[in-house]
Image (tube, coloured by chain):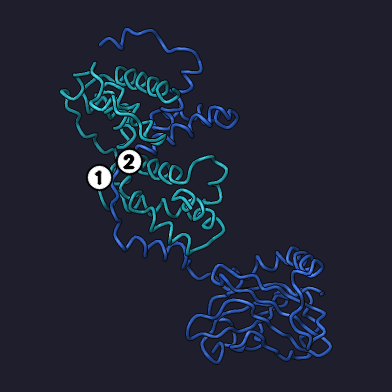
Amino acid sequence: MSDQTLPPDGPEEDEDRVLAAEYALGLLTEEERAWFEERLDTDTALRAEVVAWDEHFAAVILDDVEEVAPSPQLAKRLQTILFKPEKHSFWQQIWPYGLGGLAAALVLWLSISTGILVPVDSRLQPDLVAELAPTPDGEGLVIRATVDTTLAAVEVVRAAGTPPDGRVFELWLIAGDAAPVSLGLLEDGNSTLIDLPQDLLAVLPGALLAISDEPPGGSPTGAPTGAVRAAGPLTSS
Amino acid sequence: MTPQEEVENLIARVAIGDRAAFNHLYDRTSAKLFGVCLRVLNDRVEAEEVLQDVFVTVWNKADSYKVNGYSPMTWLITITRNRAVDRRRAMKLPPVPIETADLMPDSKPGPEASAIAASEARQIKACLDELPRARAHLVRRAYLEGDSYADLAQATGVNLNTIRTWLRRSLMALRECLSR
């Protein structure tokens, strides 16, 4: 074949272009690929060359490869894998929200001081407040709790989101390492006022509020049984 | 919104954890991406496992899409194609033979060499058509089916170094044509 007697590779640029194509096609040996990827880290022109090849080859695929519907089971499997993760323990679900306390307080302070978030209710003179951030199970929930320690009451405002069909939301207090204490169920409306036991008032600052979904009437065990849907720390308002 | 903007928008929403957007993106793209897996693996069960893996990656890595400079379908296709090729190599599937007769009429350009690219996206196809037909076939095999140099050597009975030389020369010619 005439090709075998052709002169060796041209200038360095051409060599890089072909290497980029070979890389895009997965034709390089393991050592060549490792070496090439090392260069990619620092060489933006080389990276652009790879992207350009990928774009061209993808255009061929878009045109030449026929669409074939995967089985419907695959869509279902993905829903299970991605969106119904194995139930984590209550504490595993809760801990990031405790760590996020400082950030949440800052965001809250910013939103109040910039007027984005105006306190909704004037019945209470809140001195503690918690923004309950939705967990992965609580997508779409916007819940805010304000506490008036003088009146010993907490008002929970649910601005968006509803419990799953046939379930109710229950509010929990977690102070330090203590077990969650039920504060009561959220009413159907968007605002619920709940009286707080006097003996809890001292532990409120810095404690976590959490919302779980429970069967109608609330948790049958006295501890959360459903998924934690939202949680956030109580901070001074 | 163009279809491209639509897919881009869906990926952006997936990046912030929008499940509805993910389902929509799946409906929009899974048939094409499954076609890619099947083309490389030629086995529905294996192809579905790879596609599942691809969509898990899309859900987890959608936030990295913006920084890598790809158009949205290319990003999805490249992930899919590369995963399928990895799987194929791990399975050590033998390559589909290439008829020597297909390789030999080597000096003539492909039948559609004169066709003018209808759009920029078709540029690559026009350039592939400028290559000798057998050479274009090797490039397509490498891309669409994920053949390695060793696969192509085995499939054609041609020595590996020769195959590599052929393919590299074809890629060089392609690159030249593409930059015209």
- Disc 1 chain ID: B
Local SS, label 2: helix
Above or below: residue B140 compared with residue B24: above
Which chain gets the blue colouring? A
> Which residue is denoted by mark 2 in the rendering?
A63
Residue plotted at (51% across, 54% down) = B9
Q: Counting other residues with Cα less than 10 Å from the Cα at mark 1, is it few (<14), some (14-19), or many (20 or more)?
A: some
x and y, in percent, of residue A169 in the image? 58, 83
Amino acid found under the numbered disc labelled 1 = Asn
Residue plotted at (33% across, 22% down) = B167
Q: Is residue B161 left or right of residue A210?
A: left
Q: Are marks 1 and 2 on the same chain?
A: no
Of badges 1 and 2, the one in the foreground is 2
* Quadrant containing the C terminus of chain A in the rendered view: bottom right
Q: Is residue A209 left or right of residue B155?
A: right
Q: CA distance from mark 1 to mark 2?
A: 19 Å
> Which residue is denoted by mark 1 in the rendering?
B42
x and y, in percent, of residue A214 in the image? 54, 84
Q: Colour of chain B?
A: cyan
Amino acid found under the numbered disc labelled 2 = Asp
Q: Nearer the viewer, residue A221 or B146?
A: B146
